[in-house]
Amino acid sequence: MRSPTPLWTRCLLGLAAPLLASSLLGCEGSSTEVLHQNTTSAGGAGGAGPGTTGTSEGVGAGGAGSTGGAAALPCKRGMAYGYNSVADLKALSPGVSWWYNWALQPDNDSVGSAHAGLGIDFVPMAWNGNAIPDLAAKVPGDTRYLLGFNEPNFGQQANMTPTEAAAAWPKMEEFAKAHDIALVSPAVNYCGGNCNVTDPFDWLDQFFAACPTCKVDAVAMHWYACTKDALNFYLDKFESKYKQPLWLTEFSCLDASDTSVAVQTAYMNEALPILEADPRVARYAWFTGRHDTIHSIDLLGSDGQLTPLGQQYVQYPQSCKK
């Protein structure tokens, strides 16, 4: 079984929003990142940029600028986690409408058979370029969205330069077009060491310069800062640079000296209203269900049981579209 291992460096992020950009770019490690040891082999990358258009009401699976293909997203809230059981999904289902596990298939056959009946959408990910040959054999037939590569600017993740990503992306497009699937960009974040590009926006811009006609229906990112000002800064910058809907596919509070349950609870109370109200945010996912060492971020306790933080996440009011 794949076990997420924490890897982080910290930077002071408790600043007023106008100061955040310079402070982030000035730090060696400006955001917590988590090492996801994927079950697929290493390699690959991807990107997102201003080449296509869309709205937070849905992302298209047609050509550049399309808003056709996948249906509108009724609810935003999801979870980044790789070891769900059917009981876990039942516990989450009142407030979580989707999840992904950094892989092309659901966690196991039981979950794969049960999730649709529980109203929880599974979103596969091509973790790296080496996953592309397996798309046809492994991606479930009811897939509507396909996530791109995981943190390609990180050496310990997908680890591909923008140019390498641009070369790999057309194969993703070919599969998506053939199956009427919308493509979500690779998820980037600020990298604090062993990076091919430190700044996520530089990586994305270089990708689109290398592949100006690449089709990307939504833009994904990760974020581990712990204040609403930091979250607003990050969202505002993505929204100012890219036209597509946004997917925040990993977030929780890990870039702080105190990552206790109380801190997670307070941050979640600040973050959820922002994410629910922002019309550009199409989906978001808390990291994670159960962590090996940082249990303060766990949404799940024993099998099929929510932690108090999980209850808060599931029960928080949602702005679902009709």
Image (cartoon, grey):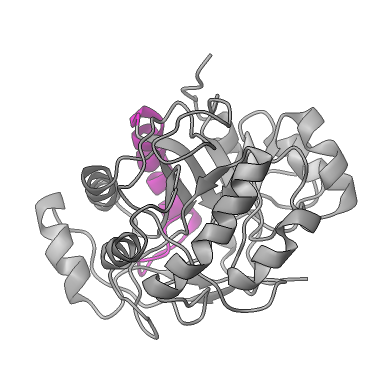
As drawn, the residue found furthest toward the bottom would be 194
Residue 145 on the magenta segment = no
- Would you say 16 lies left or right of 267 here? left
Residue 116 image position (x, y, % from top left): 77, 33
- Would you say 96 lies left or right of 88 here? left
Q: Is residue 147 visible?
A: no
Residue 19 image position (x, y, % from top left): 11, 58
As drawn, the residue found furthest toward the top would be 322
In the image, residue 125 above or below residue 57: below
Question: Residue 75 is drawn in which quadrant?
Answer: top right
> Which residue is drawn at the image coordinates 87% and 40% (left, top)?
113
Question: Residue 134 is drawn in which quadrant?
Answer: bottom right
As drawn, the residue found furthest toward the left would be 18
> Which residue is drawn at the image coordinates 78% and 37% (left, top)?
115
- Residue sitting nearer the eye, 272 or 59: 59
- Magenta residues (range): 251-279
Residue 86 image position (x, y, % from top left): 83, 43
Picture mark count:
0
- Residue sitting nearer the eye, 129 or 102: 129
Quarter of the picture containing the N terminus is bottom right
In the image, residue 310 above or below residue 189: above
> Which residue is drawn at the image coordinates 33% and 52% (left, top)?
49
Residue 112 image position (x, y, % from top left): 83, 45
Q: Is residue 229 visible?
A: yes
Residue 264 on the magenta segment = yes
- Would you say 179 lies left or right of 239 here? right
- Would you say 65 lies left or right of 307 here? left
Question: Residue 266 is drawn in which quadrant?
Answer: top left
- Residue sitting nearer the eye, 321 or 181: 181
> Which residue is drawn at the image coordinates 34% and 59% (left, top)?
225
